[in-house]
Amino acid sequence: MPTIKDVAKEAGVGIGTVSRVTNQSGYVKEETRLKIEEAIKKLGYKSNEIARSMIKQKNGIVAFIIPNSYHLFFGELLQFVEEELYKYGYKLMLCNSSQEIKKELAYLEMLENNRVDACILITNNDIEMYLRKDLPIISFDRVYKDIPYVTSDNYHGGELAAEHLIKMGCNHLMYIGDDTQGVNTNILSEVTKRRDGFIDYAKKHGIKNIVNLVYPLGDYIEIPNFVNKGIDQHPEVDGIFCISDAVAATVILELEKIGRKVPEEVRVIGFDGGRSFINLGKSITSISQNIQEIAKSIGEMIEAYYRKEKIENKVIDVEINLGDSA
């Protein structure tokens, strides 16, 4: 197997010069760089991903920036996106931002510096001013001007939840979810449409008693104590739609703790698919996102960028997945 010394000898340069070219870490004359690239091709030198990327003009790595890695839906999404991108020859790099904008910008800088071929972005921060419109950035569930996005049909999901609860005889409804618009931010979150679709459908079908229990943006899973208090303060509620399955699981536990049976007394619907919460003793009725189709769309959009094709935003349909909770 050829070494960096072999490349240097073939190109008639020093080892340090080859290293600067393969690592893109310093200035090298264009004529010299071309000699080194030709030597790498000829010898088949493959020291690392960066050396290979120099030949292909791509390094085969896509960064997936997520707010946290313990949200179960994100875990499922990562798996399917990784499998889809692998078909195109990409490896997936997980970038856990912990919702910190500094981390997100640092990861995006990797794209600007050609260390990754594309970025998939999920964020609650207002970072639109930092997004390069000419680079392959795919946003999931967030809408920015001139940045391609993939999202589920969250509004229709809210409608499906309201439709099912009303069909099952519920007359006093509640929505529970965090404020996905965030605080002091201008980003448009498609997730907010879950609440909008739910409330709009319920009102159109004669439901006047709707409790909208919205709390400040949190960590996606843990919900504030005042949500439990809100549940306690509304014993009339017989149907609840939660922003996610994680929240629905917590709500079910709280209801049963205070002696209210699910679904006999209160029906609960989550959002994401209900696949990951099997330790409650019952399955969660949930609005299911089509993760496979989301992942497929993300892969196609990244490829379209490199084929210089027009990229269309994608809204993926959802469906209700019936379980034991509603």
Image (cartoon, rainbow, N blue to C red):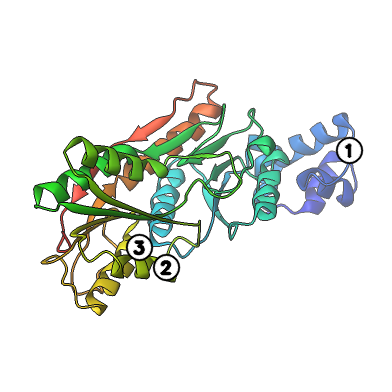
Residue designated by label 1: 28
Residue at 48% x, 25% y is: 311
Residue 90 x/y as whole percent: 52, 45
Q: Residue 231 sits in which quadrant?
A: bottom left
Q: Provide the secondary structure element on which disc 3 rests.
A: helix
Q: Earlier in the sequence, mark 1 or mark 3?
A: 1
Residue at 21% x, 35% y is: 204
Residue at 86% x, 30% y is: 30
Q: Residues within 10 Å of mark 1 (few under 14, many from 20)?
A: some
Q: Provide the secondary structure element on which disc 1 rests.
A: loop
In the rendered image, which quarter contains the C terminus? bottom left
Residue type at mark 3: give it.
Val
Q: Provide the secondary structure element on which disc 2 rests.
A: helix
Residue type at mark 2: give it.
Phe
In the picture, measured across the screen, residue 199 lies left or right of residue 238, that is right
Residue 76 x/y as whole percent: 38, 56
Residue designated by label 2: 226
Q: Residue 129 or 65: which is nearer the viewer?
A: 129
Task: Give the Cα distance between marks 2 and 3.
Answer: 14 Å
Per the rendering, the mark at residue 247 is 3
Q: Residues within 10 Å of mark 3 (few under 14, many from 20)?
A: many
Residue 120 x/y as whole percent: 53, 43
Q: Residue 213 or 189: which is nearer the viewer?
A: 213
In the rendered image, which quarter contains the N terminus? bottom right
Residue at 78% x, 52% y is: 4
Task: Give the Cα distance between marks 2 and 1.
Answer: 61 Å
In the picture, measured across the screen, residue 23 lies left or right of residue 253, that is right
Q: Can residue 158 be seen in the rendering of this structure?
A: yes
Q: Is residue 116 above or below residue 267?
A: above
Residue 257 x/y as whole percent: 26, 79
